[in-house]
Amino acid sequence: MYAIAIHDQTLVWQTHDAPRGIAADEVRIDVAWAGMNRADVMQRAGQYPPPPGESDIPGLEVSGTIAEVGHNVERFKPGDKVCALLAGGGYAEQVVVAEAQVLPIPSGVGLRDAAALPEVFATAWLNLYMEGAAKQGERIILHAGASGVGTAAIQLCRAFGNPCFVTVGSQAKLDACKLLGADAGWNRHEGSFVTPIKDWGGADMILDPVGGEYIAQDLQVLNPDGRVVLIGLMGGRDAQIDLGLMLMKRQRVIGSTLRSRSPRAKGAILDALHAHVWPKLASGDIKPLIDTAWPIQDADTAMQHMIDNANTGKVLLSVSGEG
């Protein structure tokens, strides 16, 4: 098959060994589209290797068609259109993945848009409603609100009754987030977000892919019993925080990653998505926001677009171009 290899931090589409034979609980997927994520950027830079035993090909989410199923697989058959959450291997013509990490495509959603679902909606659901335990009516801050995860999280907040405030990098991105359902927001180039969020009423939960100096500011705007769920380190891995403030307001900082979780744990997250979010995708209440799509041969160009923070929503790679 063909797949992306990383050579000197360059993404090269070249011949590659096809995935191994499938186990009893696995499926083989002919990939149509792959979603691009910040984790792929980090992997290209040598900062985020795949978990032990996983493919060294980047790519954490795909859509495509089932080509083969293991003899214990019950939910899928060859020919089914699906999307899948991966630990790696998505920038390729084929992937092999546990059945638990695969979902049928929601009714009315095509293969192209389906590639924008697994990673970002699993990340948003996991961290808002499982790790962050957000309750209806609680106020939520979404940093990098115009990212793939951010645009998914905005829609989940709107659908499940959580007012949300976004921080973004431009007025155009802020306008786009408000159209999706964000209640308010702030352009980070205009200074600290602390006063605007306090004026908005503070936060009960913050979804933070930035880290670094943002953490201390997060705690300033976080209400008593509030939670910060840290999902990335775009701003660096070091932070200075006021432990006294954290103690007196009973605040929590929760670190969370999705990629290294077991197939069973990922399956539980996807089961929750299928139950709570898939019906809203089928009805059109929630829609994946696609920024741009490139042929997978142009993966380097697509990744630079993401590195430049030029995207609002998902960046996709076309593998077969189907759907």
Image: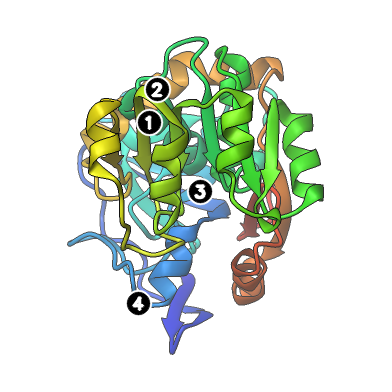
Residue highlighted by disc 3: 62
Query: Hey, what amino acid is under mark 2?
Result: Tyr
| C-alpha distance separating marks 3 and 4 | 22 Å
Residue highlighted by disc 1: 126
Using residue 250 as the reference point, say whether residue 32 is left or right of it.
Answer: right
Q: How busy is the neighbourhood of tag 2: few (under 14 within 10 Å), some, or many (20 plus)? A: some
Q: How busy is the neighbourhood of tag 1: few (under 14 within 10 Å), some, or many (20 plus)? A: many
Residue 13 vertical placement versus 97 (above, below): below
- Classify mark 2: helix, strand or loop: helix
Quadrant in the rendering for residue 268? top left
| C-alpha distance separating marks 2 and 4 | 31 Å
From the top left corner, tell me how far across and down residue 41 is, in percent.
Answer: 48, 68
Residue 81 is tagged as: none
The colour scheme used here is rainbow
Q: How busy is the neighbourhood of tag 4: few (under 14 within 10 Å), some, or many (20 plus)? A: few
In the image, 230 versus 218, the foreground residue is 218
Query: Hey, what amino acid is under mark 3?
Result: Val
Instruction: Point out the tag, 3 or 4, that comes first from the N-terminus.
Output: 4
The answer to whether residue 113 of the structure is visible from this angle is yes
In front: mark 2 or mark 4?
2
From the top left corner, tell me how far across and down residue 267 is, in percent.
Answer: 30, 30
| C-alpha distance separating marks 3 and 2 | 24 Å
In this view, the residue farthest toward the bottom is: 8
Instruction: Point out the tag, 4 or 1, that comes first from the N-terminus.
Output: 4
Locate the C terminus by quadrant: top right
Q: How many marks?
A: 4
Q: What residue is rendered at 66% in x and 36% in y?
A: 288
Residue highlighted by disc 2: 129
- Classify mark 1: helix, strand or loop: helix
